[in-house]
Every structure is written in structure tokens, then in C-alpha cells.
Image: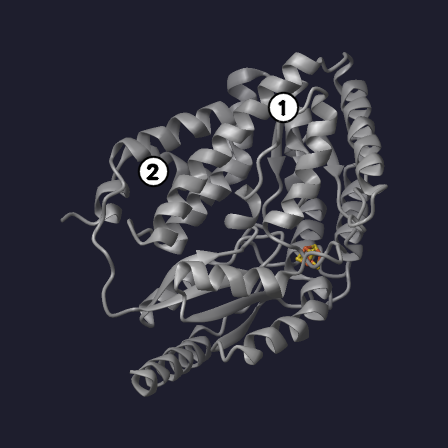
Amino acid sequence: MVDIEDRVVPGRAIARLTAVAGDPDAYVREWKQRTGGRVIGAFPMNFPAEIAHAAGLLPVLIQENRETITVGRNLLTEFYCGYTRNIADQAAKGRLSIYDGFYNADHCIQLLGAVDVTREFEEDTPVYFGQLETSIGSTWAIDKVQRKMAAFRAEIAGFVGHDIHDDDLRASIELFNEQRRLLRRFYDERRSGNAYFSPAHLQVLVKSGMVMDRAEHIALLQEVLQLGLSAERQRGRIKVHLSGHFCHAPRTELLELIEECGAQVVDDDLFHGTRWIAADVPDADDPIEAMALWYLARNVAVPCPTRVQHDVDWDGYLLDVLDGSGAEGLIVLMAKFCEPHMLYYPELRKALDSKGIPHLLIETEHEGMPLESMRTRIEALLERIRRRQAVLV
Ligand code: SF4
């Protein structure tokens, strides 16, 4: 049987998706030239992009780039995460001037610092700090979130100079749901073991979807799906779950290294992965209410340590999904200095230890990737799992 990667990689659709994921700025410039439209830069992780799309804008989730942090070095402290320091650097170098507006929906203090730097350097471009509720377990949460979604709608309507109609918002919601449904097919097939996709290729599908015009992205995903999902199963590899890494994509070379060491990634809860696509916007008469319900549903679908909800926890979620995917171990990818993740990690470790689940923490940085020492640690984890299997047989 032909491996799915051999069939997909040379294809036109995957080449286009790979190009966009590799250089989002080039896509933004090209889209603006092609359409004459306006593009807003959204910061991760919860901006309701459907509202901007319904207003006729292209909402782009601003991605970390690969440039060395130079002029932006002194704008944020060294102990801010790589994503925020890179955003400050992009702002200082004028890389963000391709955007016509900036929108933030999240509370993370480091992210707020990066958005503030953006405002400083892009002083003629509107910047909107609209923060969605982080405490979402209470009965009043839905009301507050709904009001915030309405505020986003009003703000974006002011930006484009016209109202955003309910029907346009419903159409955008349907389009975004379709994009999520298509992306989930790849993840579901991988999880069920019916098809094999490398984590680097799945990241391309998701990352390009955070940037591209959604209709264009959907058409390309459909083209990839037409090639068929049947694929040779991976044999003799250790099945692992990749967890964490908020806001920005883990480096491709790290994802490739994990597989090179003999692991097969069968599931993840990465932001550039399952976390981004897990929840659809539900049906509701009022599309703003639907957007609010979507925001609340996201934390149930894949719990996030940047949110507080007492009846939902990330560790419990992970134990459940490990059961479902058959992953034999877990690799936590943590962006260095990501406070919400650092604070939650001890809970996570306690839960995994209590069930005897082998796991490994890898911290990532914007610069400097000690791949050889990571290789040793990943190989040690896989060896531990192999020996455990031998004992259990
Ligand atoms: S949530 Fe973590 S990765 Fe995201 S901006 Fe905040 S510190 Fe950085």
C-alpha cells in the first residue's frame, strides 16, 4: 500500500498549504494584492475570527517567524515566552505593518505586553484589547462572554464602517465549522489508526488554515482528502501523545526528531493541532450567543490552563484521551516561560505519575534548539516505554 505522505506531499494542494504555513506574511501580501481587501492580525488563542470574516475582512492568526530576535530584544524581558518576544521583534522590524488592524481576546500578561509593543510601533493602526472572561465555570459567564462577543462585533463594525448582519455571521460560522470538520477528519483518522500523518504535515494543514482565506483553505483540504486517507500503518513504533505548546507552532525539526527517535504521534492537544479545531460553533438563533457558546465549549473540548472552570480539568481530559488513542506515553512541549503552562504542569505530572504513564517535558525556545540533547531524552523515554511493555507482557 502507498504511504499517504508519498501521495500527498508532491500534490499541488499540499505544496500550496506548505508554502502558506512557511511564509504567512507572503500570503497576506499576495491576498491583499489579489483582492484589495483588508487584513486584521489576531493574537492567539481565542479571537472569534468568524466575526471579522463576516465583516469582509481576512482574519489572520499572527504566527511566530523564524528570524533571530534582534531589535526587539530589549522591548520585553528575557523571561517572556518566545512567541511574545518574537512578536515584539516583528513589530520593531515593521513586519506587522502588513496588517490593517490588531485584535486580542486573551488575558495572558505576556501577550498583553507583546500587543502593547505592537501598538507602540504600529501607532496608526487600530489595536483592540478585548479580553474574554477567563473564569468560565459560573452561571453568569455566558452572559459576560456574550456581551464581549457583541463588543467585538461593534468594534469590528466600526472598523469596517458598516454593520455586520446576522446572516453574514451565520454564513461565516458555517464556513469555519466546515473548515474545522475537515481538519478533524485527518486527526480522527490518525487517532483511530486508520491513517498515518506525521505531526509536521498535520501542523501544515492547521497553520495554513489560521492564515488563509477559509474558502480557499477548505478547497485545498478537500483536494488533499480526494487523494484518499488509506495508508500503511506504522509498525514497531511507540505511540505517543503530544501535549501543550500554546499560541505558536512547535518547530518542525522537533516534530520530525520525535518520529526519527521511533515514536508515532497518535494524538495531540497542541494549539496548532487538536486544540484549535476541537469545538464547532453550535446552532443558536442569535449568532452572537452561538459564538459565546463556542468559546465556552472550547474549554470543555480541550481544557486550557489559561481558563478557570472547576468542573473541567486538563489532567482528567488527558487521561481520558490517552485511553482512547492507545498512546503509551506523553511528551509535553512547553514554551519556555509560558506561565499558565508552567503553573499547571505539576498537576499534570501528578496525574500522569498516579497512573504510571511515562512522560517527558521538553521546553522550547524561540532560538536555540538543542536537538541532540532532546534526542537523548526522547530516546530514553521510548526505551523506558519499551522496557515497561516487556515487563507487562
Ligand atoms: S499563553 Fe504562554 S505561549 Fe501564549 S502568550 Fe502567554 S506565555 Fe506565551
The circle drawn on residue 138 is none
Task: Residue 173: give x, y in percent of width and height.
Answer: 60, 25
Q: Residue at x 72, y 47 (%)?
A: 92
Give the class, few, some or many, for how many residues have Cα within 10 Å of label 1's Cα (few <14, many ≥20): many
Amino acid on which the number 2 mark rests in the picture? Ala
Any part of residue 34 in sight = yes
Q: Residue at x 40, y 55 (%)?
A: 199
Q: Residue at x 52, y 61 (%)?
A: 320
Task: Residue 119: give x, y in percent of width and height.
Answer: 80, 41
Amino acid on which the number 1 mark rests in the picture? His
Q: In the image, is residue 265 above or below residue 278?
A: below
Q: Give the labeled residue for mark 2.
A: 15
Task: Residue 358: give x, y in percent of width and height.
Answer: 47, 78
Q: In the image, is residue 366 above or below residue 20?
A: below
Q: Residue at x 35, y 47 (%)?
A: 189
Is residue 227 rendered to the left or right of residue 241?
left
Q: In the image, is residue 24 above or below residue 283?
A: below
For the residues marked 1 and 2, what is the alpha-carbon distance in whole angstroms?
25 Å
Q: Nearer the viewer, mark 1 or mark 2?
A: 1
